[in-house]
Every structure is written in structure tokens, then in C-alpha cells.
Image (cartoon, rainbow, N blue to C red):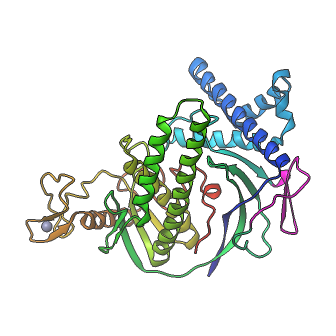
Amino acid sequence: MSRTVKRAFKFRFYPTDVQAAELSRTFGCVRLVYNMALQARTEAWTLRQARIDYNATSALLTAWKKIDDLEFLNEVSSVPLQQALRHLQTAFTNFWAKRTNHPTFKSKRRSRRSAEYTTSAFRWRDEKLTLAKMSQPLDIVWSRPLPAGCSPSTVTVSQDAAGRWFVSLLCEDVIAETSATRRVGIDAGLNSLLTLSTGEKVTNPRYERADRERLARAQRNLARKQKGSANRAKARIKVARIYGRMADRRRDHLHKLTTRLVRENQTIVIEDLTVCNMVKNHRLARAISDAAWRQLRTMLEYKAAWYGRDLVVVDRWFPSSKLCSACGALAGSMPLNVREWTCRCGTIHDRDVNAARNILAAGLAVTACGDSVRPQRGSSRSGQLSAKQEDPRVTTGVPVR
Ligand SMILES: [Zn+2]
């Protein structure tokens, strides 16, 4: 059995000066249109309790293009601007469904610089990609092969904080389905990245700690530099480079891990740790593990859909750490530093493995009762992607290996 799925392939590319200028201009316009539409929607709601939908913002965009001061909006391809309005619509849909926070304005410095092109805004010929408003194809580094004969339906161009350019191509690909019968529960933690109900502990890669220290050092160095100075700009790029490399390595690690989990198991149960639920914590280690967990969940969601697996998301309502997975007794208080405990029934538990087993049991109960054990905020089964910060198609370009 095999199935056809949409899959993003991400590559680096090196723009000419003209292309770089055109793309930078486009990024700026995308950000401006997104922010203006967000402002219009927010004002309509606060002043008149009116909801402005995508079509209304699209009409607004047409009007903005006729204003003298905004004439430059006509100079870039109109497709990325329309796509920005669609992204805003998705952001509001997720917000209304209580999956994410209210959309925020895109900042020139902190937000991701990107532009999305649909088929009417690029040409794909002889494996060469030419974007609207450009005469030359992009100089792409084809670091891995695209599926044979594929033709991208969406193309996303982005630039990271370290100044590297990327293009992501959404293509149809064929996934060979394999069968699996195993089931697994996953507990997210700080000490080990994940603990599985099988007893396996997945740790952070060894280089993670060194990377993290390097990042902290670069950040301290940046904080010492005077605002607006050339040295500060240099220090900022250094931080961005380290961060970018860490993100690359983490993504790579998570891809391998999620592919293995999805290949080996028919049912995967995870906890619902959405951003809204998470305690805001500014500690670096915590922030990084939270980001890794979000990324892991997104990858599990779409890969489970690809391979026809069940991803069950259980709400964090039950005391997974305190409940004995052998006899069901509830232990007393369980401070975070307790790594191992003995239940009244005599079972000695590793805290995280026990939690993972309880998560698996809760997930299986959910599937047995037809998803009705407890109302979920988002969808609880795979196949319906939910609760995400970013479009996984565009942000997770590395294919399964
Ligand atoms: Zn027990």
C-alpha cells in the first residue's frame, strides 16, 4: 500500500543582488500587509464587535494599493501579499479555537522573513524555479533529490536571522505504507527529552549542552554591547548563527526520532502541552525543550497522517506521575526531584516511565470510547492537524530518512 502526500522540501539558495533586493522588498510588503490587516480586524472587533474575514481584508488590500503612500505595494508580486492575508485568517481560526494566542504584529527584527508563492506566481521548468518579478531562476543548492517528476504547488522563500536564504517546495510524494502493531505512550521531560512507555529514554543529543552554553555566552556578549553600535550588530549575527545551527541540528534529530516512532508504532499517545497551557518560563533550557516538544508534536501529527497511524493526544488532566500504572493507586505528593518511587502494591516505578505508561493507558481508553471520554480543545486524532504555531508544510522541509 502506498499513499500520495504533500510534502515540503527545503533547500538553501544564493540570490543575486537584484533577487535579494526584490525578496527583501517583498518580505517588507508581506509584513506591512499582515500588520495592517491585523490592525483592521482588531479595530473592527474592539470598536464594533465586527468580525472581518479573509474576503474583507482582501478587498482592503485592493484599496490600500490605490493609496499614494502605499503605491509600492504594486511593485512586488501580489500573491505573497494575498497569502499573508490567508495566514492571518489561519492564525485567527486557531485563536478562536483556543489553540493559540491572539495573533500579534510582525516585527521587522524578530519575525520570520518569508513570502509564499502559489503556482500563478512562479515558473517551474526543467527543474528550474523562477519567481514572479524575476528574470533569472533561483540558484538553488539541490542537497537532496525531489520526487521524480514532481511539480511544486507552493513555494516559500525565507531568510533566517543569520542571513541565510531558503526555499521550500511543496510537492506531491508517494509514501509506502508499512504495518505496525505496537503502541507507545510518550512523556515529555526536562532531564531526558522523552520517556517511552517501553522504558526507553530518549536523551537530548550530546552536543546540545555545549551548543546551549555557547548560545548563552554569545547572548551575554550581545547584552554588553552598546545599542546601535557596529559591534552589537556583529554580536547579534553571531547569536543568530549559533541559534540557527542549533535549530538545524535539533530538527534533524527530531526528524529521525519521529520517523522511527511512527514507523514502529500503530498508536502513539502524547500529552497535550499546548503553548497556552505551558508556564511561561524564561530559562533557556526550558524554552528550548518546550520548542522541541512543539516541533516534535507537529512532526508526529503529519507523519502519523502520512503513514496511516493513530496519534492520540490526551489532555493533561490526570495525575500521570502520581498514578501507579500497575495497580491504579494514587500516590501522595510527588516533588519534581523524586525520580523513583515504590507503590503500596510493591511496584518500583521510574517516575517518567510510569507517567508514559499512564499516558498510553489514557490514550487507549480515549480510542476505545470513541474519542468521547473527555472533550478535546483541538482534534485528538491524527489526520486533522491542529494546535500549531506554524504551517508544518512550510517549516518542516527535511524529508523522512
Ligand atoms: Zn501500585
Q: From the viewer's side, name the closer residue of 172 and 249.
A: 249
Please state the horizontal and vertical placement of residue 1, each as a whole percent of the image. Answer: 62, 82
Residue 377 versus residue 298 in the image, above or below: above
Q: Where, by quadrant of the figure, is residue 39 drawn?
A: top right
Please state the horizontal and vertical placement of residue 325, each as a whole percent of the image. Answer: 21, 67
Q: From the viewer's side, name the closer residue of 229 and 66.
A: 229
Magenta stretch containing residue 125, yes or no? yes
| Image position of 335 (left or right of 231) | left
Residue at 58% in and 49% down: 390
Residue at 60% in and 38% down: 233
Magenta stretch containing residue 235, yes or no? no
| Image position of 151 (left or right of 158) | right
User: Ligand 1 appears in which quadrant?
Assistant: bottom left
Magenta segment: 119-141
Task: Name the image quarter holding the C terminus.
Answer: bottom right
| Image position of 190 (left or right of 156) | left
| Image position of 109 (left or right of 205) | right
